[in-house]
Amino acid sequence: MPFFKTDDGCSLFYEMLETHPSRTTIVLLNGTLQTTLNWKTVARRLASRFNVLLYDARCQGQSESGQMPLGLNLHLADLEALLDHLGLDKVSLVGLSHGAYIALALAVKTPALVDKTVLCSTAAGASYRTRMIVRSWYEILKACSLEAMVWAALPHVFGQSYLRRNEKMLGQMAKTIVRRNKQAHLKAHLEAMGRYPSMTRLMRKLDTPVLVLTGSDDPLVSQEGAKRLAATCGGKHQQINDCGHSIPVEATDRFVETILSFCISK
């Protein structure tokens, strides 16, 4: 399995699907509780037209935590170093939730690296309720177990229709999420997120195309906030109906079609 070693000795897991030199590379950026495995169906379908890079950020999946204090700037440095290691000087970014935060931050910090940016399940400023929900996950993680935290998160990270359709599978889904994450790593991840600058401090007009995607049944993201994010960045907002926070899983076909259409267009 391929691992990239950062300057401070932290091993980051990554995987590259297709390596055609004439193709654009799309980087898929994990949300909280996600690993590269969550992207596999999407990645295989995008690989029909693009090179696709998957990686686990620090404290996610198969990647280590390292010795450096976790934070947004460290995530950006890791991603820039990985792209340099792979010889990628221009990529399109598709980030979900936490991954969208990293995608926007990189597009603002190093615009020359970014061709197009898709910000999925995020908005301009988290509501007080959203901040309290995330804080509750952290407190459950400290006081109880990773499994308890995952069960508390399920109704927030999936839409109601998806939960109903997959009711008999929720127990197995929870076990899979627990197996793919480490409690100490997730705790560090949530602690670090609490120190990030607000999305409103990051967002600004970008010179490259931006698409903001939200689910109509996402309790964590305000549709008005998503529209404001898109407008500020000079991009477009698109709502995916009957879908929650985890759009790539809940509406895979619509998500892939939307990404292909956006990334292929001039």
Image (cartoon, helix red, strand yellow):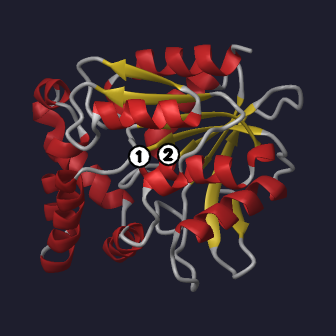
Residue 141 vertical placement versus 27 (above, below): below
On-image quarter of the N terminus: bottom right
Q: Secondary structure at mark 2?
A: helix
Residue 147 sits in quarter: bottom left
- In-image side of 173 versus 28 (left or right): left
Asked whether residue 172 is in view, the answer is: no
Residue 92 vertical placement versus 151 (above, below): above
Residue 127 vertical placement versus 13 (above, below): above
Instruction: Look at label 2 and name its amino acid.
Output: Ala
Return the residue at label 2.
Answer: 100
Instruction: Look at label 1 and name its amino acid.
Output: Ser
- In-image side of 76 versus 132 (left or right): right
Return the residue at label 1.
Answer: 97
Q: Residues within 10 Å of mark 1 (few under 14, many from 20)?
A: many
Quick one: 105 or 96, which is closer to the camera?
Answer: 105
Residue depicted at 30% across the width and 31% down the height: 223
- In-image side of 34 versus 73 (left or right): left
Residue 10 sits in quarter: bottom right
Quick one: 167 or 107, which is closer to the camera?
Answer: 107
For the residues marked 1 and 2, what is the alpha-carbon distance in whole angstroms? 5 Å
**Contact, mark 1 vs mark 2 (Cβ under 8 Å):** yes
Residue depicted at 60% across the width and 13% down the height: 261
On-image quarter of the C terminus: top right
Q: Secondary structure at mark 1?
A: loop
Q: Whole-percent x and y of residue 75? A: 59, 64
- In-image side of 207 versus 169 (left or right): right
Q: Whole-percent x and y of residue 175? A: 23, 53
